Image (cartoon, rainbow, N blue to C red):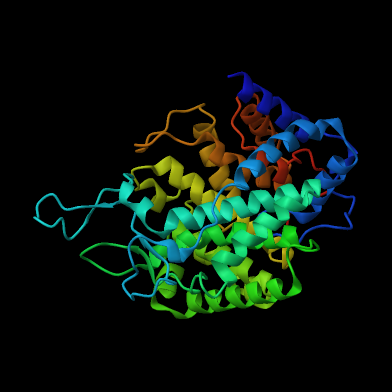
Amino acid sequence: MQTARWLALMGWLVLTSGPLLRANEPAADAPRIFQSDGQTLARVRAGVMNHDPAFEPVVRKLRELAEKDLAGGPYAVTDKKFPAPSGDPHDYVSLAPYFWPNPDTPDGLPYVRHDGRRNPEIRQYDASRFGAMGGHAYQLALAYYLTGEPRYAKRAAILLRIWFLDPATRMNPNLEYAQLVKGVNNGRGTGIIESLRLLDAIDAVGLLRGSDAWTDHDQKQMGMWIRQYLKWMQQSKNGRDEAAATNNHGTWYDVQVAAFSLFIGDEAEAKRVIEEARQKRIASQIQPDGSMPRELGRTNSLGYSVYNLAAMTELADLGRRVGVGLWNYQTSDGRSIRAALDYLLPYVMGRKPWQGQQISNFNDASVFVPLSRAAAAYHDAKHEEAIKALKSSERADVIDLLRFPVVDDRSGRGD
């Protein structure tokens, strides 16, 4: 796999780039983004603009992705094959991924659950288009921000406008009919996890600010859409159900509420949610040994444990923006984000065999982002060594390499 080795090498070059990535040097043009640090990305941009050779391979790969994205879509919620239960083509609808036709009934209803096995029917509804829109808009916007190429900004803006803003194609700001179970319900609170795609969308918006392709009117309209969706999240039955979830769904719900609140300028609401996460998420979901029982009960228990850790570390990074410390929060009996990470580390790095169920192949790359966040917060050598091991074994995504290039950051980014 010569290409994979090349990507691993370029990732290592980005990680070990020189003073342009020093976190204690503020950047003047940092974008307002929420899944990663705008100051860090601005320093990466400075390196690219200064033709630092360490960045050339990774930006070349990003350009390749963006060129493909130029031909993708556009995507619209109104393009659905099957209507939402409301009959409104602007309403988002998706199927619960782990539910399958009932083999014991003539019509296959009600659908029955097979945890960890994805029903391919889900591709016929809105979830795939939603994910493609968010992912492509983000990659294009990132490519524009780092290279200044206006074609990328123009296409990203088109994808965002068609999905969110244009009256003929815009999505209604709710997920009332997300992850429905045929023969059982028309939608569930668990479907709200699918609006994680919105995190890519609002970061794309932040990366497009200042371009000719994204206007002040676009920005205002997008803010109104997110405000309406956040209101639905917090007031609807589905939203209240998801807020009460005691596993990764609840943690990701908090990430979304915090990020969306910050996007619309409601710092107080973001702070409230993150403060409550100390008890509501960390203390209640993590055991003193670092294990997460609600995730261990799944058929893909390692994958879901890492997934919940990813949510907690993202929430901790958002907490720093509003002065709430989650990174070093610890209960009297030792429950903490750090305990969860250190519990999982030997398993995800292959040093110990996982004892729980994992019926699907574990995605090694899924640990890169939470591990990178933790390395910047804790400055623990074992976390930094694990990142180096991921690099040398070719387990990192090019987009994540750009978003999280700093591991040896001694400026004190913790709580």
Between 116 and 94, the one nearer to me in the picture: 94
**Residue in view at x 82 percent, y 51 percent:** 42
Say whether residue 117 is left or right of residue 235.
left
**Residue in view at x 13 percent, y 57 percent:** 107
- Is residue 137 placed above or below 237 in the rendered structure? above
- Is residue 268 placed above or below 302 in the rendered structure? below
- Is residue 355 placed above or below 319 in the rendered structure? above
Q: Position of residue 62 (x, y in %)?
A: 69, 40
**Residue in view at x 74 percent, y 39 percent:** 407
Q: Position of residue 363 (x, y in %)?
A: 49, 36
Say whether residue 195 is left or right of residue 301.
right
- Is residue 32 placed above or below 338 in the rendered structure? below
Between 284 and 27, the one nearer to me in the picture: 27
Which quadrant, please, contains the C terminus?
A: bottom right
Say whether residue 53 is left or right of residue 33.
right
Q: Position of residue 8 (x, y in %)?
A: 67, 27
